[in-house]
Image: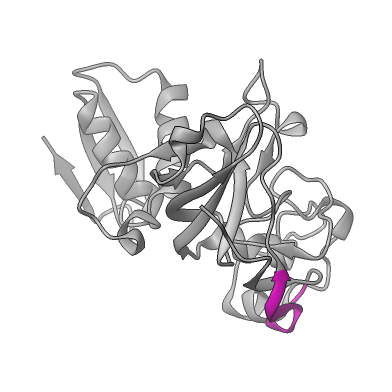
Amino acid sequence: MTFPAKMRAVVLIGHGGLDQLEYHEDWPTPEPQAGEVLVKVGACGLNNTDINTRTAWYSKSVTEGISNAGGKNGFDAADAASGSWGSSSISFPRIQGADVAGKIVAVGAGVETCRIGERVLLDPWILAGGDWLDSTRSIYFGSECDGGFADYSKIRSENAIRVETEQSDAELATYPCAYTTAENLTARSGLKPGETVVINGASGGVGSAAIQLCRLRGARVIAITGSVRNFVSIL
């Protein structure tokens, strides 16, 4: 399949407020390198990771909490040298967008051409081999590399997960960040069937995903939403 040389993209030119985002209609379309696939973006979600990366809220110099004002205008104490989720610097310009659903339209060397045409959901955690908890050797899609706020995006082939579902791209694009985060947390807990788990903030994206993943493991879930007094027990 062919793809255009230029594409539409929302480009982040630096850390800060909403004024750091620029819309372009002639941005170069990325070309997949060895081991990569090129995905035509069907939908891309927006989550707190994208906002926190733009504002450099992840940097250790920022001690205040997330707020509407900070999301709109950035944080005065932000340190660009450690502005990513992994506390490293980000190269600008950068296309953000971690949560992508779409279709593979081209592949790089070493990737089977039969993948072209696959409908895929992208796993945003591009983890290094060996210790997958070592953030210094791993990167996040839309943070340390370009993401999905564009017509096309490229990613490592194994991070493009084939999906067969009647759900729309917009529905699928709500999953990657929330569900991979919840799955990592659940896996690290070593949860076993029959055990009871308490999930705080259970009404959010990660919390609601964690409820489902824990239930699939056969656990009893106590879900806390709002104040500690307001909880729901799921048997």
Quarter of the image with the C terminus is top left
Image quadrant assignment for residue 6: bottom right
Q: Is residue 204 above or below residue 35?
A: below
Q: Measuring 38% from the left and 50% from the top, which residue is drawn there?
A: 175
Q: Is residue 133 above or below residue 235?
A: above
Give the percent coordinates (x, y) of residue 219: 21, 26
Q: Is residue 21 above or below residue 215?
A: below
Does the image show residue 139? Answer: yes
In magenta stretch: residue 112 = no
Does the image show residue 148? Answer: no
Give the percent coordinates (x, y) of residue 121: 42, 46
Task: Answer left or right for 125 relative to 83.
Answer: left
Q: Please provide the residue range marked out in magenta.
A: 16-27
Image quadrant assignment for residue 14: bottom right
Give the percent coordinates (x, y) of residue 157: 56, 34
Q: In the image as oriented, which residue stretches furthest toward the front?
A: 2
Q: In the image as oriented, which residue stretches furthest toward the left?
A: 235
Q: Measuring 35% from the left and 64% from the top, which residue is drawn there?
A: 170
